[in-house]
Image (cartoon, helix red, strand yellow):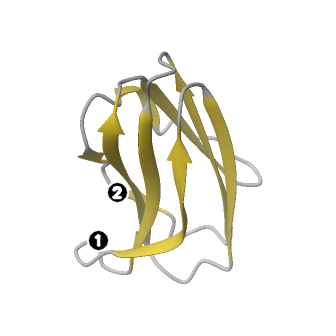
């Protein structure tokens, strides 16, 4: 998995993940642990891994949540995840998938 047991007790930015060789990527967020959780997950993209841009709609996460997103027609080299905490804490697991692989 891309992120395993990431704490949602504070705002964070994940490491970059190279998507340069893929045309389509699926992203699955799974949060567990606290009904008091409140925050948002935002995907960002970059061509060079230095300058970042938000894309797709940010997702609000509260309590136990499962969210799947599809990224198609990828014309950039990297993606990453930014979590902004409002309240509570929980654990986040993220999987990235392509036609033939799971990360």
Q: What residue do we see at 43% from left, 37% from top?
A: 38
Q: Which disc is residue 62 wearing?
A: none
Q: What residue do we see at 75% from left, 49% from top?
A: 100
**Secondary structure type for disc 2:** loop
Task: Measure the alpha-carbon separation of dots 2 and 1.
Answer: 7 Å
Q: What residue do we see at 60% from left, 77% from top?
A: 74
Q: Earlier in the sequence, mark 2 or mark 1?
A: 2
Name above or below for residue 34 compared with residue 82.
Answer: above
Tell whether 66 sits left or right of 17.
right
Tell whether 26 sits left or right of 19.
right
Residue most extreme to the right: 99
Where is residue 20 shown, x and y percent of the image? 50, 71
Where is residue 52 shown, x and y percent of the image? 31, 75
Tell whether 97 sits left or right of 85.
right
Q: Which disc is residue 49 wearing?
A: 1
Name above or below for residue 54 compared with residue 68.
Answer: below
Disc 2 marks which residue? 16
| Quadrant where the image shows the C terminus | top right
Q: Nearer the viewer, residue 21 or 32?
A: 32
**Secondary structure type for disc 1:** loop
Where is residue 69 shown, x and y percent of the image? 67, 56
Q: Quadrant of residue 16?
A: bottom left
Tell whether 55 sits left or right of 13.
right
Name above or below for residue 41 compared with residue 50.
Answer: above
Where is residue 73 shown, x and y percent of the image? 68, 80
Q: Nearer the viewer, residue 44 or 77?
A: 44
User: How many numbered markers are drawn?
Assistant: 2
| Mark 2 surroundings: few (<14), some (14-19) or many (≥20) residues within 10 A | some
């Amino acid at each position: 998995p891309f992120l395993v047991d990431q704490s949602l007790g504070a705002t964070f930015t994940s490491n970059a993940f190279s998507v340069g060789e893929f045309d389509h990527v699926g992203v699955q967020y799974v949060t567990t642990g606290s009904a008091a959780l409140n925050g948002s997950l935002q995907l960002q993209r970059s061509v060079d891994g230095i300058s970042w841009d938000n894309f797709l709609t940010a997702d609000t996460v509260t309590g136990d949540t499962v969210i799947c997103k599809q990224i198609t027609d990828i014309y950039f080299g990297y993606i990453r995840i930014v979590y902004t905490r409002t309240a509570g804490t929980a654990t986040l697991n993220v999987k990235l998938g392509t036609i033939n692989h799971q990360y």
